[in-house]
């Protein structure tokens, strides 16, 4: 194509490089730039054209390149004042990624390039923006079960995935992977970030990479590093989503809009900083406000930044076909100068968007800024990650004293946090493990973090892990220790899946995956960060246990109650929800109601009793080191034991006698009346 010498005025309403019928429209927002150039590149990264955007309307610089089309590689250069003391970082020698680009080509090489960095920067790519309808978006009435996974780590070491597809978007779509998820009862696959990200310079200097991906450089582009064909990352992700949809599994993406890869004042100039730093980042004078711990914080009070967030979500919803989003450090997205506001315009704009607002919206309800812990503070229709559940369940089963009341609140949906108008128990996304922190095997194998390989002198990662090693740090050949560890894991998983709310599993926990005590494996793109499926035989394969437990959960009347129940189990008293008469009660092992003293005793095995119409369901919790005899309350039909976490597969091998049953040490027992034998 013979390039014109200049651009024509374009359309300022379509931000980014947009492919039109007769050419490409460029538009970028910058209030303080004096001029912005579009630079074109060939496949060898040679700059073959540089043309200023000729028009400027209401902060938008724009231009039109006729006879151009999809596949065009380009970057931006912004002219203006370079005065970091005033928060201005204009530098035309820096090639910039278009914030609205939906595809990126090439790699970022920190610290290279000399005065002009063009050869060390990835290029924005113009793509065909036509939308293909989403196929078979799941509409299931089953209680949701989330499964958090890393695209690369999930399949990188799966022998039943073709080597070419291991660690890729295509790997997610392989029949063996989908069959495994289905066997666990997973209904929602939550993927760690797939927005285009780059490695921090300090990691590159240590020979490491940002494996987790929480370092975005282009919010609307799919990360090509997980694609078998890097030129069609969005197509491969969409193919995987379609395959999961066909199997009835939703896909939720973990998205990062609280900060960018440009870091603090000493960070690289990649995109937003070079285009208009005071618009895109929160500043105090010339200093970056760091509410995220990553050096910068996006200025979500600005309408253009809000548009960037919403446009990015719509891009992934429409073109990748995903079913929702989990927002990293989401408090940042609702923070005003006066603190967090659940009515923040960005949160309202997301929920009100006709495309995005109908999808799953999940907040990580904290950051490190002032008033940054906001669990339970988000408005409907948001769900929230509930770390209080994680901490309480770990501490309770470890044997920490006086936690009966706290544990019961977590099992009962954390109502003190979420029971407000418009909110439901399912808004609590509870978990025992997640990508951040110990994996399940390490929760029962390590007391101290072992993060030396991260290169930060073992100072990184959380020091408060509420873990237990049963007397031996790390792996053990002692059969008693190994048996005790497996029993503890099963008790925690049973608590997770039997609690009111929405449970989330961590990929690999079912296979005994370990990170060898590393509780911050964000930079370990290797056997530490990947799921070690081959460890199942040694550390206990929990697949059958979870399969049976999730199957039971689908049958329990108490599993998907859409309201917080506060009516005591007393005679005919009940709370009417959806036409069902529901009551709940807490019982000691002798079947008498729990007293205030029991709740705060050093230890008191107890049961949670549900009445849902004519059906009764009893969950017995015994965290002590000895079996406890439970007396069963009167019921309209005979009690039947349907689940026992003391058993490797969860299948109960005994039934009550004379309305009594023994509950093994460190275990959960489930008994029901009025349920058929088929439980999954």
Image (cartoon, rainbow, N blue to C red):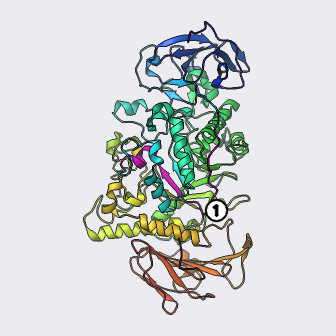
Q: Does residue 155 show up magenta in the picture?
A: yes
Q: Residues within 10 Å of mark 1 (few under 14, many from 20)?
A: few
Which is more toward the observer, 618 or 531? Answer: 531
Name of the residue lying farthest toward the bottom: 658
Against 181, residue 122 (above or below) is: above
Q: Main secondary structure of the magenta part?
A: loop
Percent across and percent down for residue 259 are 55, 35
Q: Is 169 above or below relative to 678?
A: above
Relative horizontal placement of residue 121, taking residue 315 as reference (left or right): left
* Pick the front one: 284 or 308: 308
Q: Secondary structure at mark 1?
A: loop
Residue 141: in magenta span: yes
* Residue situated furthest top in the rendering: 5
Identify the magenta region.
132-157
Q: Residue at x 31, y 67 (%)?
A: 482
Residue 270 visible to the viewer: no
Furthest toward the left, the residue is: 477
Task: Report whether residue 303 is seen.
Answer: yes
Q: What residue do we see at 36% from left, 40% from top?
A: 456
Give residue 565's position: percent from left, percent from top.
Answer: 67, 71
528 left or right, relative to 170: left
Percent across and percent down for residue 213 are 47, 39
Q: Is residue 667 above or below residue 363?
A: below
State left or right for residue 321 relative to residue 645. Answer: right
Q: From the image, tell me which residue sits under label 1.
A: 141
Q: How many discs appear?
A: 1
Residue 652 image offset from top left, x and y in percent: 45, 79
Name the quadrant of the N terminus: top right
**Residue visible at 30% across and 65% down in the picture:** 471
In this view, 43 is above or below 592: above
């Amino acid at each position: 194509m013979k390039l014109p010498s200049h651009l024509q005025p374009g359309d300022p309403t379509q931000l980014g490089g947009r492919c039109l019928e007769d050419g490409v429209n460029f538009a970028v927002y910058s209030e303080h730039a004096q001029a912005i150039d579009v630079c074109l590149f060939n496949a060898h990264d040679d700059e073959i054209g540089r043309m200023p955007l000729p028009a400027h309307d209401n902060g938008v610089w724009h231009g039109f390149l006729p006879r151009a089309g999809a596949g065009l590689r380009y970057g931006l250069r912004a002219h203006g004042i370079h005065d970091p003391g005033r928060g201005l970082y204009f530098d035309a020698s820096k090639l910039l990624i278009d914030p609205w680009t939906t595809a990126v080509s090439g790699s970022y090489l920190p610290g290279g390039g000399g005065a002009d960095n063009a050869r060390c920067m990835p290029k924005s790519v113009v793509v065909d923006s036509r939308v293909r309808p989403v196929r078979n978006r799941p509409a299931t009435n089953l209680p949701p079960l989330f499964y958090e996974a890393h695209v690369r780590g999930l399949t990188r070491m799966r022998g039943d995935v073709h080597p070419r597809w291991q660690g890729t978007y295509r790997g997610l779509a392989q029949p063996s992977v989908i069959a495994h998820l289905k066997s666990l009862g997973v209904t929602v696959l939550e993927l760690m970030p797939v927005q285009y990200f780059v490695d921090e310079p300090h990691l590159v200097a240590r020979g490491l990479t940002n494996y987790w991906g929480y370092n975005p450089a282009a919010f609307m582009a799919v990360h090509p590093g997980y694609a078998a064909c890097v030129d069609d990352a969005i197509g491969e992700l969409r193919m995987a989503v379609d395959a999961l949809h066909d199997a009835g599994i939703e896909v939720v993406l973990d998205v990062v809009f609280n900060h960018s890869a440009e870091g603090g004042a000493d960070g690289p100039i990649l995109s937003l900083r070079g285009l208009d730093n005071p618009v895109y980042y929160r500043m105090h004078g010339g200093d970056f406000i760091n509410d995220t711990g990553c050096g910068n914080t996006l200025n979500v009070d600005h309408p253009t930044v809000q548009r960037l967030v919403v446009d990015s979500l719509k891009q992934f919803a429409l073109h990748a076909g995903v079913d929702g989003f989990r927002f990293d450090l989401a408090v940042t997205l609702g923070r005003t100068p006066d603190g967090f506001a659940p009515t923040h315009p960005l949160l309202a704009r997301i929920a009100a968007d006709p495309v995005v607002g109908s999808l799953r919206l999940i907040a990580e309800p904290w950051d490190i800024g002032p008033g940054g812990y906001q669990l339970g503070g988000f408005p409907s229709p948001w769900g929230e990650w509930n770390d209080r559940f994680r901490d309480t369940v770990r501490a309770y089963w470890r044997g920490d004293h006086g936690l009966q009341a706290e544990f019961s609140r977590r099992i009962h949906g954390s109502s003190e946090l979420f029971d407000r108008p418009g909110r439901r128990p399912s808004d609590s996304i509870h978990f025992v493990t997640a990508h951040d922190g110990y994996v399940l095997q390490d929760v029962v194998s390590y007391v101290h973090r072992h993060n030396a390989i991260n290169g930060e002198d073992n100072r990184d990662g959380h020091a408060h892990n509420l873990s237990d090693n049963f007397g031996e740090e790390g792996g053990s050949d002692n059969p008693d220790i190994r048996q005790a560890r497996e029993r503890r894991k099963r008790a925690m998983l049973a608590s997770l899946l039997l609690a009111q709310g929405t449970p989330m599993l961590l990929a690999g926990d079912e296979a005994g995956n370990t990170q060898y005590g590393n509780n911050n494996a964000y930079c370990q793109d290797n056997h530490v960060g990947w799921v070690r499926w081959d460890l199942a035989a040694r550390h206990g394969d929990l697949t059958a246990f979870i399969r049976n437990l999730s199957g039971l959960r689908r049958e329990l009347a108490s599993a998907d109650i859409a309201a917080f129940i506060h009516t005591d189990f007393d005679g005919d008293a009940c709370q009417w929800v959806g036409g069902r008469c529901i009551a709940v009660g807490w019982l000691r092992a002798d079947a008498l109601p729990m007293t205030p003293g029991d709740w705060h005793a050093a230890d008191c095995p107890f049961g949670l009793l549900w009445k849902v119409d004519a059906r009764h369901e009893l969950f017995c919790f015994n965290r002590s080191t000895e079996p406890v005899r439970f007396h069963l309350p009167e019921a309209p039909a005979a009690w039947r034991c349907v689940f026992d976490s003391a058993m490797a597969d969860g299948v109960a091998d005994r039934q009550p006698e004379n309305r009594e049953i023994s509950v093994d040490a460190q275990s959960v027992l489930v008994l029901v009346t009025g349920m058929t034998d088929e439980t999954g």
